Image (spheres, grey):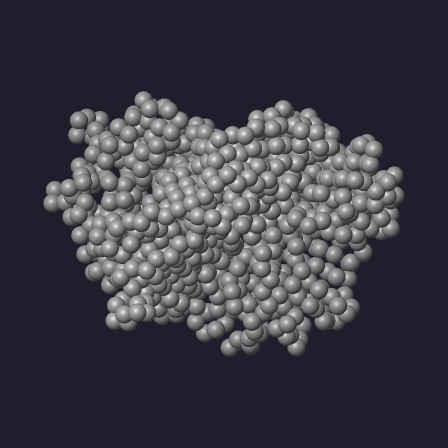
């Protein structure tokens, strides 16, 4: 027996734990069959070896989120811990020693101050954001007065204003002396902007795009780094480069400086000597700063410009000549700026894959384009050979047009994804942007000559969430689909879950509602999503609305007032998914109040009567329908087209939101009731169950016809009516038959948008139409998943028809994971790995034997360990004429499983490897 994957707060060796009762988890692995943990013991030690807590031997099978119950932890303390496990065979195993460190517990323990350049660079006299908000505010006020003012889209408003300047990053520098080589040194830091840290000439790893994206006035994450090996006895130096990032960069539609105009730094270094003495170096007036480095601007969306002629050496080298550097200003301490500081426990952003260029193309119009063969989020590394002063640009795009030429939909300067390098004319020059990232497969190069593929490397970036799922089968097109889903997930989990790495980089909540289940199969996302959920709770407005983007994109002015059903539902769907995935009850309790506020807000929205409807008995149902305000509905239904003939999101919303969002209203009341039942609030849960039933009554009476159809006949409406049981049970087969008829009439193609597509295949399978589900998945016409694969996709498209059959390319994102939610179906119902309990303590293996595959194999690494499954159709070696199915796999210790056989019978499985052969 072994003890593996030991974590504290779901992270290996966290450096900033601020939970005073941190949670420990582990897995047990054994070569024996049917192994269960009988008991555990946790011991926690202070850094000097003194015992701080001994749980004693606890008779329990629990291995996930065991809370610390010892003496109070110290702020910035360092701790070791060990796990001891006894199994049902009498074996005892003691783990290796693991480590965690506490963060800064209280705001007043920050002795550092915020520093900024004493002479900041000039910005616009007036920030455009308040002016833009005022225009929309007046438009709304006029509409409330019954007037018909000029109506503005957000883009119309922002077109009225100029942009803030594109500025070079500021470099903050400090020298300091240490008497002896420290035994331990750690730095806590954050910034207004995104930063990198170098100490004594070496870059400290783990700072990529730190501190990430949060709403700075409500929440700002700080990070911690062990820098012991970077320090030396005697003179030391550090340099922190702070670029605009999300703090003052031009994010989404904005013109910049939405959180502030001046970059800033907060840094506190703790240095420990051999004798236990502590030296503290803080951001203060001892720092100097400079805007005069080689990076001339760095923007997350536009790109980065480096003038190599301005390279002045490494400011983190103690010998660097910094005579011309300027003073910093220490900001007056505002307690609210320290109260919002939150330790980052979730994984850092990393370069997870380096991809050499596949080839260099000369396009039909004579341009030089580098093809990396894979769409991604990231940057490039380029070996440069050029004359001094020569300017070379690198423009990033996701696809080529129908003629094979470079194309990029978002051509305005703020979104151009264009990195620029001005050569110093030296040998060995390398361009490697650091303070931006792009969505791309192709890079158009302007300038330079005689380019070779080996000069180019793409660096794909993503949060370092461990990979947990694999899926492969005998159909290579489905394998490519799984590949595309995975790469879109990695591209859109960069600090927060985003919609796309190009146009917006925004934390659209609805995308996670749609895709969350698939995400949690592919990667261990607990710490990542818990971090984002904290931002969601802090962003919730006073009316209970969960915002459509989190962090809230302020320049989406029309969406800063209210949330949408389907999107705000993430406050319910995601915590419940995390709970069932791992048994994480803490996330349910943390989000419980926010859940109820959201459901109540949507109840209030439903209670409003539509214009022209008066109170009375005939209007009673109207109080339980969504027929006022705006919601996104079944976003991007492929049959709803714009003037150019491509999918139209807003039109889909206006068309579908009454039916779709009324179904979601009932589903949310049920979800909240489920959470309340878990917490013992049975009476209140019953009230929400009753409310959901009343919504269903109104739905059936008002939105359905007497002959048992929906008044608005769309595939997605039928799917959601069936998924959420919006109709009487005895009507469900009739509704399912009508759904099937509509799909057949559409040549077995889906006509589903965001809210309905996750349930398309489950509804068909559960209603007895498994063959049709398989046909829809595998048909290769537009719209369809295999259509994208056959048209060269390497990630998931935002729109079903992003590339039309006639070759026309839409101006949308080609790296959008929402429609990749089909991955959940591949894992659960094709491969067959399903969670039948809480935290996969009980596992159901139900392979899709009847699907047209020769074999499928894959795995999922649960909180108890790896589950493996392979099934294949073959001939019996002894009787070749008899078709058989061979099923094999592995069940982790401390769990139990059932395998569904081809005849529908079930076979119980204990932990360990298994194999069985049965007639087809």
Q: Relative to residue 513, is residue 143 depicted above or below?
A: above
Q: What residue sits 51% from the left and 44% below the top?
A: 28
Q: Is residue 690 above or below residue 648?
A: above
Q: Is residue 358 left or right of residue 486?
A: right
In the rendered view, tell whether residue 332 sits above or below residue 11: above
Q: Residue furthest front?
A: 90
- Which residue corresponds to the image point at 86% horizontal and 40% vertical from the top-left? 180
* In the foreground, 146 or 417: 417
> Do we see residue 27 in this rendering?
yes
At x 53%, y 59%, the residue is 376
Q: Which quadrant of the figure has residue 559?
A: top left
**Rendering coords of residue 571 (x, y %):** 43, 36
Instruction: Give x and y (percent) for residue 179.
Output: 88, 39
Q: Which residue is most to the top?
A: 683
Q: How many marks?
A: 0
Decide which of 277, 787 is in the foreground and name it.
Answer: 277
Which residue is more in the foreground, 442 or 91? 91
The answer to whether 704 appears left or right of 427 in the picture is left
Q: Is residue 642 visible?
A: no
In the rendered image, residue 550, in percent from the top left (x then y), is placed at 49, 41
* Left or right: 588 in relation to 635: right
Q: Residue at x 72, y 71 (%)?
A: 385
What is the x, y in percent for residue 563?
Answer: 41, 38
Residue 425 quadrant: bottom right
Location of the C terminus (image quadrant): bottom left
């Amino acid at each position: 027996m072994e003890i593996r994957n030991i974590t504290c707060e779901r992270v290996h060796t966290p450096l900033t734990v601020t939970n005073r009762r941190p949670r420990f988890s582990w897995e047990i692995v054994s070569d024996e069959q049917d192994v269960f943990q009988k008991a555990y013991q946790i011991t926690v030690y202070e850094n000097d070896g003194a015992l701080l807590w001994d749980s004693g031997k606890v008779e329990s099978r629990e291995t996930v989120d065991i809370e610390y119950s010892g003496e109070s932890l110290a702020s910035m303390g360092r701790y070791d811990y060990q796990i001891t496990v006894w199994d049902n065979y009498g074996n005892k195993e003691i783990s290796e020693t693991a480590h965690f460190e506490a963060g800064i517990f209280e705001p007043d323990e920050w002795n550092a101050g915020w520093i900024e350049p004493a002479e900041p660079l000039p910005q616009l006299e007036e920030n455009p954001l308040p002016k833009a908000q005022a225009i929309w505010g007046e438009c709304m006020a006029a509409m409330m007065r019954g007037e018909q003012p000029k109506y503005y889209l957000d883009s119309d408003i922002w077109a009225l204003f100029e942009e803030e300047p594109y500025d070079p990053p500021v470099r903050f520098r400090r020298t300091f002396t240490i008497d002896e080589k420290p035994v331990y040194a750690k730095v806590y830091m954050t910034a207004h902007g995104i930063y990198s840290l170098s100490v004594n000439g070496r870059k400290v790893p783990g700072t990529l795009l730190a501190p990430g994206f949060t709403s700075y006035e409500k929440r700002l994450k700080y990070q911690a780094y062990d820098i012991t090996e970077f320090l030396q006895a005697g003179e030391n130096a550090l340099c922190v480069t702070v670029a605009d990032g999300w703090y003052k960069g031009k994010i989404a539609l904005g013109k910049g400086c939405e959180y502030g105009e001046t970059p800033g730094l907060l840094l506190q270094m703790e240095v420990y000597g051999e004798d236990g003495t502590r030296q503290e170096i803080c951001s203060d007036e001892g720092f100097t700063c400079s805007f005069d480095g080689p990076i001339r601007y760095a923007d997350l969306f536009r790109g980065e410009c480096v003038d190599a002629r301005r390279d002045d050496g490494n400011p983190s080298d103690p010998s660097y000549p910094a005579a011309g550097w300027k003073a910093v200003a220490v900001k007056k301490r505002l307690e609210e700026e320290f109260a919002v500081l939150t330790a980052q426990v979730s994984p850092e952003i990393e370069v997870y894959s380096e991809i050499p260029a596949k080839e260099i193309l000369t396009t039909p119009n004579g341009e030089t384009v580098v093809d990396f063969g894979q769409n991604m989020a990231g940057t490039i590394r380029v070996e440069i050979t050029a004359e001094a002063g020569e300017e070379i640009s690198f423009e990033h795009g996701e696809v080529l047009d129908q003629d094979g030429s470079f194309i990029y939909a978002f051509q305005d300067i703020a979104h151009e994804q264009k990195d620029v390098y001005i050569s110093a004319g030296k040998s060995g020059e390398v361009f490697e942007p650091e303070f931006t990232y792009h969505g791309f497969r192709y890079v158009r190069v302007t300038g330079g000559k005689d380019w070779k593929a080996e000069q180019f490397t793409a660096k794909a970036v993503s949060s370092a969430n461990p990979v947990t799922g694999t899926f492969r089968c005998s159909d290579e097109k489905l394998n490519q689909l799984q590949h595309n889903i995975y790469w879109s997930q990695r591209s859109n989990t960069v600090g927060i879950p985003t919609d796309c790495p190009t146009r917006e980089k925004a934390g659209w909540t609805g995308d996670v509602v749609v895709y969350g289940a698939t995400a949690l199969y592919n990667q261990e996302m607990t710490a990542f999503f818990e971090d984002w959920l904290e931002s969601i709770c802090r962003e919730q407005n006073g009316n209970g609305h969960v915002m459509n983007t989190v962090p809230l994109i302020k320049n989406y002015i029309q969406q800063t007032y209210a949330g949408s059903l389907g999107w705000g539902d993430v406050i319910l769907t995601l915590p419940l998914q995390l709970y069932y995935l791992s048994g994480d009850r803490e996330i349910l309790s943390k989000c419980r109040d926010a859940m109820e506020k959201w459901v109540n807000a949507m109840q209030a929205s439903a209670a409003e009567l539509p214009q022209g409807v008066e109170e009375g008995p005939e209007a009673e149902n109207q109080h339980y329908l969504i027929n006022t305000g705006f919601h996104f509905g079944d976003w991007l239904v492929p049959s709803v087209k714009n003037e150019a003939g491509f999918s139209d999101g807003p039109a889909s919303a206006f068309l579908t939101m009454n039916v779709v969002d009324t179904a979601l209203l009932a589903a949310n009341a049920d979800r909240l009731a489920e959470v309340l039942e878990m917490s013992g609030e049975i009476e209140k849960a019953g009230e929400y169950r009753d409310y959901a039933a009343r919504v269903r009554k109104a739905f059936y009476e008002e939105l359905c016809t007497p002959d048992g159809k929906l008044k608005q006949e769309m595939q997605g409406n039928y799917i959601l009516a069936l998924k959420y049981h919006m109709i009487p049970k005895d009507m469900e087969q009739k509704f399912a038959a009508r759904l099937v008829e509509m799909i057949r009439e559409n040549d077995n193609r889906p006509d589903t948008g965001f809210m309905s597509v996750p349930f398309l295949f489950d509804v068909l399978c559960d209603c007895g139409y498994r063959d049709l589900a398989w046909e829809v998945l595998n048909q290769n016409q537009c719209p369809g998943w295999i259509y994208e694969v056959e048209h060269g996709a390497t990630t998931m498209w935002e729109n079903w028809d992003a590339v039309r059959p006639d070759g026309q390319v839409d101006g949308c994102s080609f790296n959008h994971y929402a429609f990749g939610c089909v991955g959940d179906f591949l894992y659960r119902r094709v491969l067959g790995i399903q969670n039948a309990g809480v935290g996969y303590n009980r596992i159901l293996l139900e392979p899709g034997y009847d699907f047209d595959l020769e074999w499928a194999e894959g795995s999922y690494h649960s909180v108890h360990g790896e589950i493996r499954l392979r099934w294949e159709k073959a001939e019996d070696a002894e009787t070749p004429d008899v078709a058989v199915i061979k099923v094999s796999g592995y069940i982790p210790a401390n769990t139990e499983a059932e395998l569904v056989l081809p005849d529908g019978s079930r076979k119980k499985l204990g932990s360990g490897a298994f194999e069985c052969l049965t007639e087809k």
